Image (cartoon, rainbow, N blue to C red):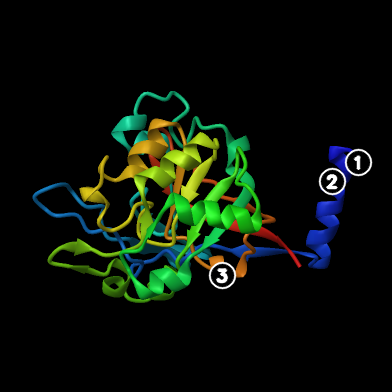
Amino acid sequence: MSSADVLAGLAGMLASGGVEVVDCTGVLGPNTPLLKLPPDFAKDTPAIEIHRISEYDADGPFWAWNWLKVGEHSGTHFDAPHHWITGKDYADGYTDTLPVQRLVAPVNVLDFAAECGANPDFLLTIEHVKAWEAKHGAIGAGEWVVLRSDWDKRSHDEALFLNANETGPHTPGPTAEVIEYLISKRIVGWGSQCIGTDAGQAGGMTPPFPAHNLLHKNNCYGLASLANLDRLPAKGAILIAAPLKIENGTGSPIRALALVAR
């Protein structure tokens, strides 16, 4: 079968509903949860603002449009390698220079929602991943890997979503060893349903924030605040996660879409 036949078949399945497009994106607006950093450590991204320019009125009689104030790493978003100091030297590590062929890829959905629900500080280990692979098949080169925690069910409430106390945020994520293992398999990137790609307590890991540190060191991508991963199979879906083509962009809010066979 030729690539043209494959595309024609896909087009037909999309039209018939045999392939469903699942929205893996949260709503982007003033109430979208945003990362909170200690003020003595770093500067925060600003709150999201949506301002009306016109809506069929004196400022624009036949059209409606808005202007936005939004950080690159707000809502469901993409982390490019240049986002982290370990990835700063990649010429193709910005949102306007990265190879777009890598953005559309098979996705492996590691379902540990029950474990994350029982323990918000749940850490994904190599043993977890290898047990998942034994059941569902090996994670391949050029594929996305995402952790299903069902954390998106908390996104209506920023405090619940961030889940922070005096010891910092408490959200699930990967160990450094897991990220190293996935990088060795040449994945394209790693994704989470939490506010960032790392666990809430990842600042105390070695290295600190291993998902950010190691992924971007190896020119891999990160996805955060994903939604609706409960509607994806463990294997077999295609994830499309394309950032805006921002000049020298370190990341971007995205509309993450998955193609799922029905």
Q: Is residue 52 visible?
A: yes
What is the three-letter code of the residue carrying label 1?
Met
Closer to us: 64 or 171: 171
Q: Which residue is mark 2?
A: 6
Checking the image for residue 1, the label placed there is 1
Q: How many marks?
A: 3
Q: Which residue is rendered at x = 33% and y = 66% of the image?
A: 33
Q: Which mark is residue 230?
A: 3
- Please rate how many residues cluster around mark 2, counting C-alpha atoms within 10 Å: few if below 14, some from 14 to 19, many from 20: few
Pick whichever of labels 2 and 3 is earlier in the sequence: 2
Numbered disc 3: secondary structure:
helix
- Earlier in the chain: of badge 1 and badge 2, it is 1
Tell me the mark number nearer the camera, choosing from 2 and 3: 3
Frontmost residue, 99 versus 142: 142
The picture places residue 214, in percent across and down from the top left corner, at 37, 37
Q: Quadrant of residue 70?
A: bottom left
Q: CA distance from mark 3 to mark 1?
A: 32 Å
Amino acid marked by disc 2: Val
**In contact (CB < 8 Å): disc 1 and disc 2:** yes
Q: Earlier in the sequence, mark 3 or mark 1?
A: 1
Name which residue type carries label 3: Asp
Splitting the image into 4 quarters, where does residue 117 fall? bottom left
Is 227 placed above or below 160 here? above
Q: Position of residue 115 (x, y in %)?
A: 42, 70
Is residue 185 left or right of 119 when viewed as pictured? right
**81 or 170, which is in the foreground?**
170
